Image (cartoon, grey):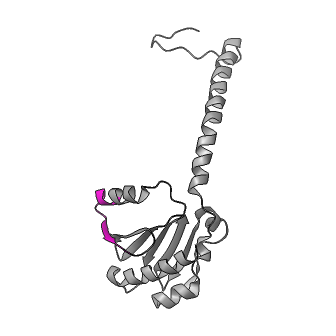
Amino acid sequence: MAVAETGRPETPGNGSMEYRMFNRKYRTLGIVLFAALLPASTAALLQAQTKTDACALLTRGQIQEILGQPVKDKINTGAARAANSACEFMIGDYGVFSILVTAPVAANYGDILLASMKKTNTKIADAPGIGDKSFFALPGYGMLQLNTFSKSSYLIITMMVPGLTEDAQKPLAEKLMKLALAKL
């Protein structure tokens, strides 16, 4: 194979025997790398998946009763829900309620997540007595997230309830999380 003035090998011309050998070599290398990485990536994906349907953990009626506001039907349905493992509802005219369930990725994931949020100056508040470990993330704009770790699952409730402050939403999120955990 010829070397160009840049010091790098020139790509052989289309159709030549040299080109076909060059192409076969890199195609084979790509297939080998793909085959080697596939089991590791598949295992990681399966580990991060959960068989729990987020929408089976809380009913629309339970959410509406605890939040004290009208809850509209699920926002995500069908394929979006299947791809997400999350269940989302509209609260009032512009609010939102979402619950996401997944398997914990690593034993120390909660600590990693907390450290990451602290680096971005996200306000954090403990939520003791819920699951194995729980905390609130308060990004602002009246929204809150309750992150809960249990032995088998990592759950996140995200809420923004029209007319309620973050502090007023905290005990409501805690009640809803306890109901969800009881169904796991």
Q: Position of residue 62 (x, y in %)?
A: 54, 87
Image quadrant where residue 31 sits: top right
User: In the image, 113: left or right of 54?
Assistant: left
**83 or 4: which is nearer to us?**
83
Q: Residue 169: percent from the left, percent from the top?
A: 38, 82
**Residue 126 on the magenta segment:** yes
Q: Is residue 125 magenta?
A: yes
Q: Is residue 114 above or below residue 95?
A: above
Looking at the picture, does residue 144 appear above or below residue 18? below
Rendered view: 65 above or below 80: below
Residue ID at (46%, 87%): 67
The quarter holding residue 24 reads top right
Write down the region rendered in magenta.
Answer: 117-129
Where does the image place residue 77, in percent across and percent down from the top left?
64, 72
Nearer to us in this view, 137 or 9: 137
Residue 40, can we see it?
yes
* Residue 70 in view in this figure: no
